[in-house]
């Protein structure tokens, strides 16, 4: 089954408000693809255009190479799982899974055989006669998936389906969803504001802001090579250092950011820089090396202002001697080396980072595109 989804310059306007700027995108058949962004960025609007609940103000939507722009919801080869799951609480598990098949006129034996097959797929064999109201949150989630798969869609659309679950269950269901998608080979299109969900499950992720797709890439590329200020800040944490380019040598940029020592980082090949250009260097919290005040091998001095215990590491907020504050992750393993005790709140310290792990992007604030349209094929 061809589950390829193609958006060709689709836009969505509500009166004078443009929810989705003209955008082109292709999602491969059998791909686990996620739209990631804050509330109100337009990701659910895009999902509703793919499902047919909304008709684009302009542009077209195709599934499997067939134009679906004017095809109604019930005639599209898609199924949708909503945030509230929309299960029938007074019906049994069997009745919930079989509902779509019954509407299509499938006979009872075929419906039951299909339901049993899907219950086995979602690891709930033998639960068919249970009332849905008696199931746990994770079990209800799996039943919603089974019900959606019963009608054999080519594309499964998921609108923040894990948001109501507790942390441990969400983490478990990420693994379950990914395994189900791999077994079925169906195209999954997932909506979330949780970067952990998107990075853990997806083959590719589209990061959205203000109705625009900022960047499309695999999770590792998004994290290591963000293309805009918004992506750099939204996908993981980053410390920003605005300044001017002092030199460029073989892809490495030296930046004057007003600190005693120049900052260095690698530049994105798609964003060339030259001496004198405004630019921003980004250093993730885990890239800092933090040591005691007497460690002369580290270039920068500072004072620990706050510390936050986060299990495997401490997050330190460090005021640099030359102004500004950075956030750094210190592994708990350093406690055995006696370093952690020297990093108490109010203690002076030294810190540094590896230039190869830092990124330099043009401008001092990017991520708000000015173009009237964006073709994400150019940013993938």
Image: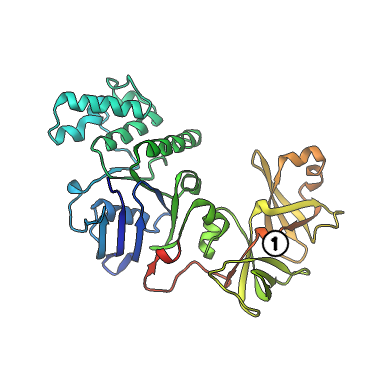
Residue situated in front as seen by the camera: 54 or 114: 114
Instruction: Determine whether, in the image, residue 144 is placed left or right of residue 173.
Output: left
Q: Name the spot of residue 80 as percent of width and height, x first.
A: 29, 44
Q: Is residue 324 above or below residue 177?
A: below
- Is residue 34 something that shows in the picture? yes
Q: Position of residue 147 (x, y in %)?
A: 27, 34
At a point 80% along the width and 58% down the height, the residue shown is 298
Q: Residue at x 81, y 44 (%)?
A: 339
Whether 37 is drawn above or below 273: the answer is: above
Horizontal and vertical percent position of residue 32: 40, 46
How many residues crowd around disc 1 within 10 Å: few (fewer than 14), some, or many (20 or more)?
some
Residue 11 position, x and y percent, is 30, 65
- Where is mark 1, residue-wise? 355
- Quadrant containing the N terminus is top left
- Tell me where residue 252 sits by quadrant: bottom right
Whether residue 210 is visible, yes or no, is: no
What SS does tag 1 mark?
Answer: helix
Residue closest to the eye, 291 or 8: 8
Dividing the picture into quadrants, the one containing residue 17 is bottom left
Residue lying at 39% horizontally and 57% vertically, measured from the top left: 40
Q: Does 3 sit above or below residue 255?
A: above
Residue pictured at 18% horizontal, 58% vertical: 70
Q: Quadrant of the C terminus?
A: bottom left
């Amino acid at each position: 089954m061809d589950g390829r989804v193609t958006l060709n310059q689709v836009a969505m306007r509500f009166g004078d408000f443009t929810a989705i700027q003209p955008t082109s995108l292709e999602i491969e058949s059998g791909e686990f693809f996620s739209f990631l962004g804050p509330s109100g960025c337009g990701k659910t609007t895009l999902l509703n255009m793919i499902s047919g609940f909304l008709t684009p103000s302009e542009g077209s939507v195709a599934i499997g190479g067939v134009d679906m722009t004017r095809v109604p919801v019930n005639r599209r080869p898609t199924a949708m799982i909503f945030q509230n799951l929309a299960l029938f609480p007074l019906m049994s598990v069997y009745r919930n899974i079989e509902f779509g098949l019954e509407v299509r006129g499938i006979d009872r034996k075929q419906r039951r055989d299909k339901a049993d097959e899907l219950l086995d797929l979602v690891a709930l064999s033998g639960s068919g006669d249970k009332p849905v109201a008696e199931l746990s949150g994770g079990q209800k989630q799996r039943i919603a998936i089974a019900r959606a798969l019963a009608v054999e869609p080519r594309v499964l659309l998921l609108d923040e389906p894990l948001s109501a679950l507790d942390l441990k269950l969400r983490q478990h269901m990420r693994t379950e969803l990914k395994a189900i998608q791999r077994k079925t080979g169906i195209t999954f299109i997932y909506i979330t504001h949780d970067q952990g969900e998107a990075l853990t499950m997806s083959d590719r992720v589209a990061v959205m802001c203000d109705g625009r797709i900022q960047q499309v890439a695999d999770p590792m590329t998004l994290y290591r090579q963000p293309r805009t200020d918004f992506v750099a800040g939204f996908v993981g944490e980053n410390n920003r250092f605005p300044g001017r380019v002092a030199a460029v040598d073989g892809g490495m940029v030296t930046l004057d950011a007003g600190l005693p020592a120049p900052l260095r980082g690698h530049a994105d090949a798609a964003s060339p820089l030259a001496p004198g250009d405004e630019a921003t260097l980004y250093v993730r919290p885990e890239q800092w090396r933090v040591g005691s005040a007497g460690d002369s091998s580290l270039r920068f001095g500072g004072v620990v202002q706050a510390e936050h215990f986060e299990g495997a590491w401490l997050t330190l907020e460090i005021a640099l001697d030359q102004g500004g504050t950075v956030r750094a992750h210190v592994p708990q393993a350093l406690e055995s080396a006696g370093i952690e005790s020297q990093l108490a709140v109010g203690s002076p310290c030294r810190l540094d980072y590896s230039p190869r792990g830092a990124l330099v992007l043009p401008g001092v604030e990017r991520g708000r595109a000015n173009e009237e349209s964006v073709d994400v094929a150019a940013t993938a």
